[in-house]
Image (cartoon, coloured by chain):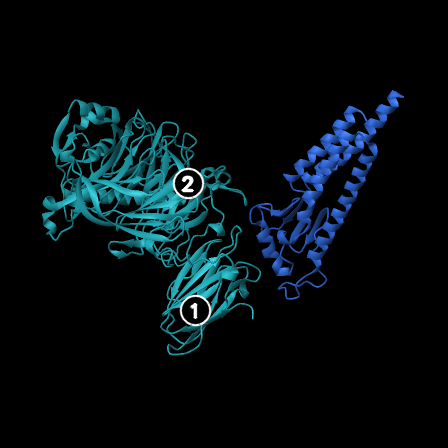
Chain colours: A blue, B cyan
Amino acid sequence: MNTKSRIMVAVAALMLILTFFFPLWTIDLNAPQYPEGLGIRIWLDQISGMKPNDLQSINGLNHYIGMKVIDPESIPELKIMPYIIVFMIVFGLLNAYMKNRKLIYIWLILFIILGVIGMYDFYMWEYDYGHQLNPDAPIKVPGMTYQPPLIGSKQLLNISAVSLPSTAAIVIFISIFLNIAALYVDTKGKKHEN
Amino acid sequence: MKNISRKTLLSAFGILFLIALTYAGCNQSKTSLSGNEAEQVYVAPGTYDEFYLFTSGGFSGQMGVYGLPSGRHFKTISVFAQNPETGYGYSEETKAMLNTTYGFIPWDDSHHPEFSMTDGVPDGRFIFINGNNTPRVAKIDLKEFETTEIIEIPNSAGNHASPFVTENTEYIIASTRFSIPIPQSDVSISSYKENFKGTISFIKLDPKTEKMNLEFQIIVPGFNYDLAHAGKGPSHDWAFFTSYNSEQANSLLEINASKNDKDFVAAVNWKKAEQYLKEGKAKTYDAEYYRNYVDHKTQIAVSEKNNQVKVLDPKDCPGMMYYLPTPKSPHGVDVDPTGEYIVAGGKLASVIPVHSFTKMMKAIEEKQFDGEIAGIPILKYDAVVAGEVKDPGLGPLHTEFDDNGYAYTSAFISSEIVKWKIGTWEVVDRIPTYYSIGHLCIPGGDSKKPYGKYVIALNKITKDRYLPTGPELTQSAQLIDITGEKMKLLLDFPTVGEPHYAQAIPSDLIMKNSVKFYKIEENGNPYAVKGEKDSRVERKGNEVHIYMSAMRSHFSPDNIEGVKVGDVVYFHVTNLEQDWDVPHGFAIKGMNNSELLIMPGATRTIKWEPKKVGVYPFYCSDFCSALHQEMQGYVRVSPSNSNVPLAFSLGN
């Protein structure tokens, strides 16, 4: 592997450190009564409000329709994800050192699989919150469920929920892309040598 | 003037007053606005006004908050009067704000709002206002728009020349309108000249703790001290007070206090006063007064009684105070943005005298005195006057300044605002007001850097300006554009309570600091509950303490039993919401107190003494949510000898 590719693999690994400092996903809730906005931010290791207390406000609203309380403490994924990222960083740096194309393929496939599992898990979590409603909820609209979209927007009663990947997810995407690019640059370099 | 008989003078003013009213009355019906006035005051839905306007509530004892240029009313801040709408002055947390040495006083007469200043410019931290009747000064925190401190002023009566702040809010100054025996004593009223005195008070604002402290008073001859303004720039060390009734009359003042050709503007060098205080020149007087303040941690108002005050006597303090002769019972005294000119509104005078600070200092240096009163040298009028504004309208009262070197004086009797140029003293424009203007206000108009743009007329008479509402009509202000050569009337708008003085400030100085809600984790009220699980009921003898939480859309607990007739019940209600604009109300049937309005994250307590057996419903009185009508509960009240155990619950 050429130096250029090795640097790309190393950068791809190191840039994952950024994912600890930015949210992965945002869910913004737009309603007439919230001109100042209301939303949650999903991080590797926590769920926070867009503003302080937004999580509490959302839980307060959710109790009317019988949704479960969002309690970051009870979500095991938030405990696992940081380790996965640390593992991917170490693995990536190792790849830059080892110059082994096969290992880069493994890194890529592993990360993509983990990503897909993560998205599926996130979808299931949203499904569960949106469908597992308290039968004693004050507001019951026949046939209505409250699953927020995975990506995109959806009208849920008076609230329009907009769900989008955020900075950390984009960083992961770029990291994956950089590894693919590194393989490509390496292949091209070899062809030139030949 | 002295040659003219009393009767002639009186009837002359009477006729002038009538003419003024008739003139204004005729004119009004003919007033038609032309051009883009509507556009100039239109603030589109969802957009903000450029300025906040704070008006005194007059005899309502409160303060009004408006937007300019729209004239929209946003809030009435509770200051000296109880407000059952919020529980101010009723709740256990706020009752102490209204304590005085005369007991609990649920009312006052508030006249002069004044912003705290930094470098002679309003800084948007606080606004102060006087209690005129039972002398007090209140401090309102502009982060919350709530009264957070009220200090009583001893040795004072009719706290009218109050509160005016020095350039960096070093002091809040206040002076007596009524002279009284100091210390108070049982003397004949006719012994006025011998026994009655006035005081000028200097309240220090601690720069760190932001607490007010009555640092010292100056005992002054028994005139009526009317209004004041602190100096700025070169006159930074000085404060100026108008006085009338230099005749020292104690009856029929309208005649007896209008005799002298000239009364006085008192000039006080407060820096020198500070120095004399340090040197130990002050006497300690026994004087009881209260200081009530909201404890930062608990958010509960606390009363603290003080027993002494330091008093300086000008006799012992040479160079601290001078009198500037000023025609005919001056009312307002206003210092121009440069700090050089001191404008007095001689309400019965035919000119507006303008004193020069430079000339005053020179006259002091050259000892150009015209006698003295009680150790206070009287400076020669000609030695201090810079000029006189001729033909300034009848009954000139107050002056504010714009950012282009012009002054604007209100004329009560001729019901108009007169614009004149500083330096040439020439009247350049005048505009009628409807009717009988008292104070006027230009944003930043008494500061070093006026914002200009508008002048607001604060009128005493409304008559036919609005739809009638029986004999009691609304109070009124008027917005006038001063950006052009000619003043232009834009808008009339009603105000809450009588607007005496008002002050305006650019919105962005205040709105960025506005508190949205209180953080529940910072709630230091000992009766707060930090979560629903802490809500409970406890009995201590015949006191029942209900630690209640409010959260959309229920109270916890909402079923309470075991309360008996003869119990004293305290509802300590904590609003657990942590969201903007979600207050909860609390009201219970048969409550002899007010309701409670509890801001998010705050705790408020109301006392209830049930007198009859029965089951009493309580509910949230501020429409909080879709299930607001479900936000209710019951308290069972049993006979005093019953054995019903204390019990409380939610949701079973």
Q: Is residue A51 left or right of residue B575?
A: right
- Which amino acid, by three-letter code, is at mark 2? Leu
Q: Mark 2 highlights which residue? A: B479
Chain at tag 2 = B
- Considering the numbered disc 1 on the image, is that residue within a helix, a strand or a loop? loop
What residue is shown at x 74% (from left), y 27% (from top)?
Answer: A7
Question: Compared to B487, does B605 lie above or below?
Answer: below
Q: Earlier in the sequence, mark 2 or mark 1?
A: 2
Question: Compared to A81, does B169 lie above or below?
Answer: above
Question: Compared to B382, does A22 lie above or below?
Answer: below
- Considering the numbered disc 2 on the image, is that residue within a helix, a strand or a loop? strand
Q: Mark 1 highlights which residue? A: B589
Whether label 2 touches label 1, CB < 8 Å: no
Q: Judge the density around disc 2: few (<14), some (14-19), many (≥20) Cα neighbours within 10 Å.
A: many
- Kindly indicate the quadrant of the structure image that contains residue A83: top right
Residue B237 lies, in percent from the top left, at 27, 30
